[in-house]
Image (cartoon, helix red, strand yellow):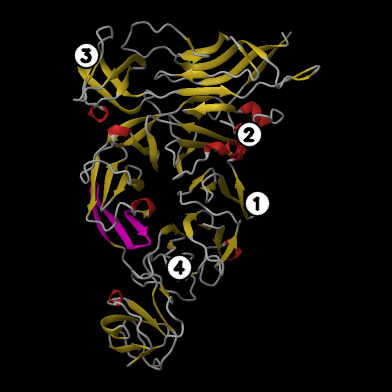
Amino acid sequence: MSKRRQGQTNFALGELSPRLAGRSDIALYRNGAARLLNRHPLAQGGTSTRPGTRWITSTLPTPAAIPAHARLHPFVFNPSQRYVCLLVEGAMWAFDAVSGAFANGVVGAPWTGSMVPDMGWVQAGNTSILLHPIMFPKRILRTGAASWVLTDMPVEVPPFSRLLDAAITMTISASGAAGTGGAIGFSSGVMTANWLGKQVLYRGKRMQITAIFTPADAAFTWLEDATGLSTEHTTDWRHEAWLPEFGYPSTGEFIDGRLVLAASTAEPNAVWASRAGAYFSWETGANDGDAIVEPVGGAQVSLVRHLVAQERLQVLTDRAVWQLRGADNGPITPTTVAYRRLNQIGASEAQPVVYDGATIFADTPGRNLYEVLYDGATERTDVSPVSLIAEHLIKQPVRLEHAPARAAQPEPLVLMPNADGTMTVFHSVRSERISAFFEWVTDGAWLDVCSVGEDVFALVSRGSSGIALEELVWDAAPLDCARRLTSAGKTRVWGGMGHLAGRTVSVVSRGHDLGDYVVDGNGVVTMGPDRPEVDEVEIGLRFLQIIRPMPIDFDLEEGPVRGLKKRLIRCFVQVVNSGPFRVQGRRVLLDFVGDDFDSPPPGGSGIIEVRLRGVDEEAVFDIEVDRPHRVTLLSLTREVSVGG
């Protein structure tokens, strides 16, 4: 019988694909795990408990309950005035990201519930632009700390297009100076009632339609000097690009002092970049600061799904990723603009994210992640897969969001709520060649996630308890949908949990686990008489944590042990500042907690020896944390015997 120990000094590469179970020959095998549930990575290589969530609200002024179609968007005016905004049918509601306080919103908006999940949102300063292909772009203007105004997006000069029969001609009754007018006629009926008040570009000069008599005849006023312009029939005319019959932009971005919009119903591959320094003017010309109207993809029509501002504007379509660039690596201008196709991998509808110097996006099927990375040394931008090591965790993400580093969480993350209600977490440190994936689950389903500065918010479906707006918290008890409650005197009875009425919750006081209780219909939790009276608690839903190492593998003189029965002897678990956990279902107690509930319990640190039992071909077992404790695991050593 041969006895063997195998150590694992880090879990820096996260949860690995089951397809890697046979690749013990590569380094990542020894630095990952078969399962890392509800954990998060440490930059030093260990793994710790994921953050819990703090409940903010489950209701809105209109409607009373948060609807399933709701989506989150950030609004950052300055570092101290930040908001998480909820879009719902006909309204936007804002909450202060620092205090969680309700900060009013707007009502009477034209968007429906079915439109909300597909709406684009681009924000700068005190302005947000909301986009959808069947809605004229809207502007939400922040006018005070808790006041907002909704209007149409102002347009000084619209972009023009020609989406009608190219053979149709146009004539005018008279040329003239700005402010004068006349009659116009088309060789075929083209106008609808939607054209009233809109602009037409005739031989390069702008006019406004002031009256419509028939689909082919109207009155107009010149908006600029057109003295001496020919009045003959011509095909040299264009209409506004954004009209109800043609659709409106669906995505946007700010870059190089321009507002760039893209993708209407009639022109899915169109990209409209405003004049530099004039966000609402699309007046074209040959000057460097003039607007740029340039479709992407040429004859191969694609749907532009996302615009991302990096060193260059990245245009992610359903068929490929493109880069919009100028000459000599300078800003884009009308005379230097050009597209470069970076790959032939289409992007899904999930909002991409800029993270660790790259743009991360999901492919069209939503089964793989890719990064778009600019290399300053070679001045090249390349697209590469990043999720091959954990493809089983990429399950049609509905959004990608960057959770930045903070004092209690120094590792920046990408959070991806999936279509099945789970959350996939991505961690990368490019300089260290670290790329890791984890999975977070909760009692319910993750619907959406939003980063507002260093604060991260989520919409979570809690089943019979409805949908809640919650904030991720790293420095509190590991509980979900939780509240922190205090009392002037010590007690065993706690109210204020109406949002979880009828649910089983866990109670924690200063890190002490005080057990599970059912919230009554009045939102009250009553602890048993054997529990201590305390003056501070955190109450919420607990979640299971699992750490499962990869199958053990090593070589004996007679060959590899893969497939042979192995007797589990013991393991050595190195933890720091940790609560109790289970190994093979048996609880491992650390330091004696005592009965001082006015102070946090001492966290266990060191190398813990745990005796194991059983025979297993892979020498795999679970380390579980089934109570609301934080456990930080640094290393794991397994001892097994083979051949007897």
What amino acid type should be assigned to the residue bearing mark 1? Ala
The picture places residue 536, in percent across and down from the top left corner, at 27, 18
How far apart are the alpha carbons under marks 3 and 4?
65 Å
Judging by the rendered image, the residue that carries numbered circle 3 is: 491
How far apart are the alpha carbons under marks 1 and 3?
64 Å
What amino acid type should be assigned to the residue bearing mark 4? Glu
The picture places residue 486, in percent across and down from the top left corner, at 24, 21
Does residue 467 lie above or below 155 as drawn? above
Mark closest to the chain's N terminus, 4 or 1: 4
How far apart are the alpha carbons under marks 2 and 1?
35 Å
Mark carried by residue 267: 4
**SS of the residue at dot 1?**
loop
**SS of the residue at dot 4?**
loop
What amino acid type should be assigned to the residue bearing mark 2? Arg
Q: In screen coordinates, is 301 left or right of 242? A: right
Circle nearer the viewer, 3 or 4: 4
Residue 122 visible in the shown view = no
Mark closest to the chain's N terminus, 2 or 1: 2
Please rate how many residues cluster around mark 2, counting C-alpha atoms within 10 Å: few if below 14, some from 14 to 19, many from 20. Answer: few
Judging by the rendered image, the residue that carries numbered circle 2 is: 19
What amino acid type should be assigned to the residue bearing mark 3? Thr
Residue 132 visible in the shown view = yes
**SS of the residue at dot 2?**
helix
Magenta region = 126-151
Q: Are marks 4 and 1 in contact (CB under 8 Å)?
A: no
Q: What residue appears at the point 41 percent right and 29 percent down from the top-left corner?
A: 51
Circle nearer the viewer, 2 or 3: 2
Judging by the rendered image, the residue that carries numbered circle 1 is: 377
* Number of numbered callouts drawn: 4
